[in-house]
Every structure is written in C-alpha cells, then in structure tokens.
Amino acid sequence: MHKYLSAIGFKHIDSRKALNKLIDFTESSFQYEKTVKVKDQLEVSERIKHFTKDMGLIVVGAYDKDDNYEREHYIPFFLGKGEKKFDELAVERHIARNSYAGACEYPGIGITIIYYLQNAVEYLSELKFHQFNQSAVSLTLSGLACEGKVLLPIIKEEQSFIEKEENLRRHSKLIKEARSGDENAIESLTVQEMDTYSMISRRIETEDVLSIVSTYFMPCGLECDQYSILGEILKIEKRENSLTKEKIYVLTVECNNLEFDVCINEEDLIGEPEIGRRLKASIWLQGRLNFEETDI
C-alpha cells in the first residue's frame, strides 16, 4: 500500500482487497492514457484518473508486441501550480521499473533537489522525437504530505521584494562560484555558515529552535525524493475526493525562497491553517516537466 495514498483522499484504504479494487477501477475508468514505444517493441502506458482537481492515480503498465496489456505499478499524484526554470535538469530511470527520478539545482536551498517525475511517458516521447532541450523546459514541483502540523509564525525582519531577490541572487552566485572552485566564494560561504551557527548556538539556550528557524527544506529518510519541510503558508484551498468524500487541503508554501504546493488529508493535519502561519510536514516531492504542449 502506497504511503502517500492518504494525501489525495484515500486514508481509509486498509486492505489489499480494497486497494486492488481501487486500482482496477482506475485502470478501467481512466480519463486519459498516454503511451510511448520503447525498445523491444514494448509500449509503456500511463492510465490517469483524477479524483478531484489536479490529483488522482496513475497506473503504469505496458503493451507487448501482440497488444496485450500488463499492469506494473501505480502512484498517487498531485499537480501543483506555477512553473520555474532550474539549473542543470537531469532525469534518470529507476532500476527496477518504468519510473523516473528528476534532479535539479536550486541555489536558494544549496542542495540538489531530487523528485519523482510525474509525466514520464511525455518525457520519453520528447526524448524520442524532439530530444531533450533543457533551456526550453520548465519544472513544476508539488508535495504529497502524509503528516503535518500548523505552527504559528515568527517575528522576522521586514524585507522588500527587491532586497530578498538581491540576497538570493548574491547567495546563488556565491554557491555557483564555490562549486567551480573559487576560494574566495568558499571562504565567504564558510564565514556565513559560522555566523549562522554562532547565532543559533547563542539563542538556543533561551529559545525554541522553531522560533529561531523560520523555514527549512531538507532530505529525510533513505529515499532521495522525500523531504522534511517548514514553510510559510501563502495560499489555502480545500478539495474533496469524489470517491471517498475525504477533505484535502492544498497549501501553497514558501521554503527557503522556493514556492510550491502541498496537498494533505484534513485528518492528517494538526492545527488550523491560515495564511502567514507555517506548515511543518514530511512530503514526497513530485515534479512535472513542462514542454511546449503538456498536461495530465
């Protein structure tokens, strides 16, 4: 049973029989199917069904040369909003099945972001017929949360949009220069880290860590596309799964200057979300590559 089924409104699927029934229903009543031929005359298929706006299930399978279909696996998905250009986009197939992981660099966070690719068939089609032109591709990130808490905001210094952008630009430039071996950039980043560490060490004696750290985005667990996040809530929407009638929050959050949408089952969220408050959650990060013509 997929750990993040709950995030799209299937929290009470509690048996293999109920799960198989759901997958069979998705497979037989899908709204879209996307296919692409790969080697050995195999045709990979994605059968997609929405159970509410922008979220549902994808059943991945394949047709053989005699047009016989066989299911391989399924995933819950959530389509976020917004598109962003990232440096050094890369995609790689998982070893054991027809699924793909994507990676990109985002200097605002300072780590390589790894995500599960939602539109793998579309990526394979693009690779097959048009090749993969990074400069013409944008990325939409989204997160599925299996648990979360709403925290109160902290008092922080007001910064204008221009100041925030300038600080991010300066920090991004330093990281790029440090990666290329610039010793001055490495030294500047080291000094910044030491100053931050010193400030936290001093304040932690009298304050809670979550009143010092306003936001974070860091890997958690052993799987590369899962993250622990703390971010400011910018927008709130509520959806309902058409099959189970379970309520789902869609929260737009900002973590380390990275803005993306997170969906979470109302039953899995502790606290009342409001704009300006913070979301602390464990998420499975997904991404959709946006080509000239794309949508699932």
Image: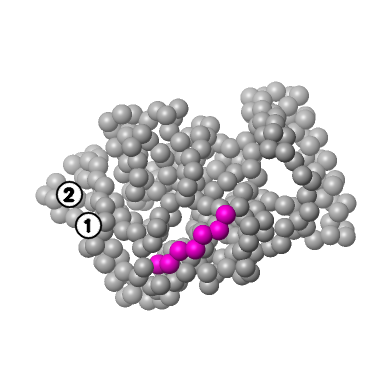
Q: Nearer the viewer, residue 241 or 89?
A: 241
Residue 261 point in image, percent of width and height = 52, 52
Which residues make up the magenta segment? 235-241
Residue that carries the numbered disc 1 in the rendered image: 70
Tag of residue 64 = 2
Is residue 40 at all visible to an observer of this figure?
A: yes
Q: In this view, does 131 lie above or below 228?
A: above
Q: Nearer the viewer, residue 278 or 113?
A: 278
Question: Which residue is farthest left?
Answer: 66
Q: How far apart are marks 1 and 2 (CA)?
A: 8 Å
Label 2 SS:
loop
Question: Mark 2 packing: few (<14 Cα in 10 Å), some, or many (20+)?
Answer: some
Q: Main secondary structure of the magenta part?
A: strand
- Residue type at tag 2: Asp
**First-in-chain label (1 vs 2):** 2
**Residue contact between numbered discs 1 and 2, judged by CB atoms under 8 Å:** yes
Q: Is residue 188 above or below residue 99?
A: above
